Amino acid sequence: MKQILTIALALIPFCVFSQKKLPVIKANSNQAKIYEQDNPASSWSINPKLKLDVHTTGKLTNYKAIKFQTDIDSISFKLGPGQKKNFIVLLNGKDSCFTEIKSPEVKNFSKVSPEIHDSIPFFINKYNTNLLPIVFNGTDSLMLNFDTGATEINFTTGALKTKVKSHPKLYDTSYDIKIGNQTYKSEIYDLSLVGNEADGLVGWNMFDGMIVELNYDKNKMIVHSKLPKQVLRDRNYSKFKITYIKNKPFIESEIAQSGTRNKNLFLFDLGYQRTVMLDNDLLKEARFPTEKMKVIKKVIMHGSRGTDVPVITSNLESLKIGKFELKNVPAQIMEQNKPMKGVNVHYLGSDVLKRFNTILDFQKDVIYLKPNHLYDTTFADQKKSGA
């Protein structure tokens, strides 16, 4: 009986497929590309040994065009939030590769009862690292960097050796992560760098379907299941639509120099400790006058994966985020070894974002910003350079 049950369970994917005729595309190479609308292409390896090969897109807020392309064929379709599309890739005319492309399930905890309004200690240190206490697996008290430019839970290799006594298996989702009064689940990854004084980082999608309030005036993070009504009544807040690119949140901002203005999407990256990082290729494309920006210094930065990133810091006349304008911002200009592979990206960093009490609404996918007591403080690079 046990053997029969095991065989039956193993055949489920094929029974599901056999109930309806699936589209078939051909391939002579096991290398393919997946194109998601408004996103760079993802590389894909076709593997006939897998019973079902699944690609999960980034978070979708509406229908997006998806294209799966082999060396000789392709299939295109629209995919909505929480949906999936199945098809077969016929490799070398003989191997049927059952393939599924799906988007993450839609999460929205606005109707849970009782409502959740969980207040957690939260503060930013002198290095512009946003620090949040957690308890891992019921035993390990750790301090993590809340990084909206990242996903999942990541521990530093150092913390895994000396502080995380649970000795977790990487990529496992069976561990409890307690943040405040709530317990979450996440895959576990390792990184070499995550921000000064942090044992690791927690990404934005830990709170998908919730609302995260960051109050720098009171040093609190408050996780809500429902948006507080006072936010909607507070006219000091400005509202920004989130656009997800490679499963990371972006908002529109504007930079200006010597009479030239340029609007673009910026990664809302609390894990980046400096002001803004501007992509040189995007600047060239917009004919932005970088030659008129006064160079403050040149340094080598280190990415979270240990890569070296050469960066020039120059004075940017104006950065506008909605109606809020910051002037003479020391901006980093990125030319090579870019942190996000396959896409040119501008970054809003923590030395800018800490100036706003922030509400991240991961139910309606919007961000609210309101200036706080840090709004007019001197930028870190200006302190170092004496500007």
Image: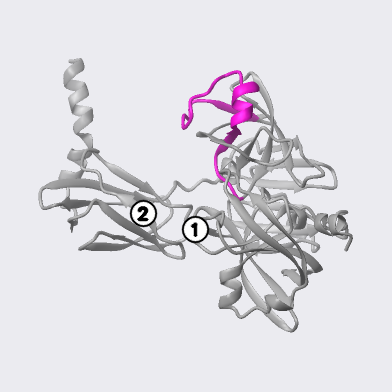
Task: Identify whether 148 is placed above or below 332.
Answer: above
Residue 114's x, y, as percent? 65, 35
Rendered image quadrant of residue 288: bottom right
Question: Is 123 positioned to the left or the right of 50 in the image?
Answer: right
Residue 217's x, y, as percent? 85, 47
Q: Which residue is mark 2?
A: 43
- Dot 2: what SS? strand
- Say the numbered circle drawn on residue 3: none
Residue type indicated by callout 1: Thr
Task: Identify whether 114 is placed above or below 311.
Answer: above
- Dot 1: what SS? loop
**Residues drawn in magenta:** 149-178
| Residue at left offset 20%, top offset 46% | 97
Residue type indicated by callout 2: Ser
Q: Which residue is mark 1?
A: 61
Residue 23's x, y, as percent? 19, 56
